[in-house]
Image (cartoon, rainbow, N blue to C red):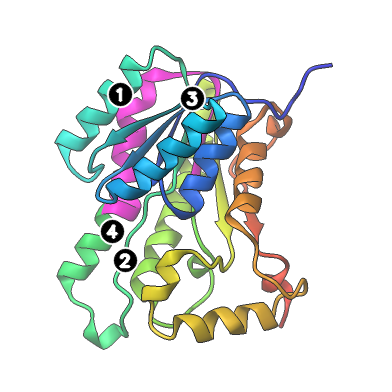
Amino acid sequence: MENLFALSGGVLVTGGTRGIGRAISLCFAKAGASVIANYVRDQKAADELKAAADQEGLRIGFCRADVTTPQGLGQIERSVQDSGEPLTGLVYCAATGVHRVFSELTTRHFDFTFSLNVRAFFELTKALLSRFAERSSVLAVSSMGAQRALPYYSLVGSTKGALESLARHLAVELAPRGIRVNILVPGTIATAVWKTLPEGEERIATAIRRTPTQRLVTPEEVAWAAQFLCSAAAAGIVGHALVVDGGAGIVG
């Protein structure tokens, strides 16, 4: 019997060596994909992921490139070409942001955040368009801040809203090419980045209290949802935003 959740071909995961991106890289490789994990700065995280992949015999390659630059986009295109695998998936997990109250934000902060969170997704998808195989998937990783106003999140949240809107338009335009585009919306996840956010620990505790399961979802649980959306089991799902938050979003 065919395993509809299996993956094949090459999958590029931006931001693929830390947090949710790391979990997705490992999950997809275990499901049969040949993964290219893109990253920029954290070499230690890339080395740790490589060690984990080698230990389990997983096919995970690495591309250190800044997707906000023409040079970085070129590096990624070459990595995809050199992999020798048909490109069957793109998971856009790379993100950045400035977490401050609105009065402290500047145009520079605006440009910096939108450059990676929105523009690079547009440019990367367009650059790889001719390389996608039939029945491939693009997955944009968003956040609850795209729809809800969160503390210190006006810039990041607005980029995620723009990312979701762009993904929905791409879903319509790329479907005739055999490319499904969907959106993944994780809830609060206790990754390392939360330690750097204002009132991070307090906000995590609040999220746990308001979640029906009384716990946060894990990066692995988000990765399983990503695998589903990129698999043949989700062949009928196009332009959808799948929320993985343990039910926190339904609590008033």
Q: Give the secondary structure at mark 4.
A: helix
Left or right side of 90 for 56: right
Q: Earlier in the sequence, mark 2 or mark 1?
A: 1
Q: Give the secondary structure at mark 3.
A: loop
The circle on residue 79 is 1
Q: Nearer the viewer, mark 3 or mark 4?
A: 3
Q: Which residue is mark 3?
A: 59
Judge by depth and name the residue closer to the eye, 43 or 63: 43
Asked if marks 4 and 2 touch (Cβ < 8 Å), the reply is no
Q: Nearer the viewer, mark 4 or mark 1?
A: 1
Q: Earlier in the sequence, mark 3 or mark 4?
A: 3
Asked if marks 3 and 2 touch (Cβ < 8 Å), the reply is no
Q: Residue at x 49, y 56 (%)?
A: 142
| Among the 4 quarters of the image, the one containing residue 158 | bottom left
Judge by depth and name the residue closer to the eye, 204 or 144: 204
- Which residue, as the protein is rendered here, is positioned at the far right? 1
Q: Which residue is mark 4?
A: 114
Label 2 environment density (alpha carbons within 10 Å; few <14, some 14–19, many ≥20):
some
Q: Give the secondary structure at mark 1.
A: helix
* Cα gap from disc 2 to disc 1, whole angstroms: 27 Å
Judge by depth and name the residue closer to the eye, 210 or 243: 210
Residue type highlighted by circle 4? Phe
Judge by depth and name the residue closer to the eye, 141 or 58: 58
Residue type highlighted by circle 1? Ser
- The location of residue 176, given as percent across then percent down, is 54, 23
Label 1 environment density (alpha carbons within 10 Å; few <14, some 14–19, many ≥20):
some
- Numbered range of the magenta stretch: 116-140
| Among the 4 quarters of the image, the one containing residue 217 | bottom right
Q: Which residue is mark 2?
A: 97
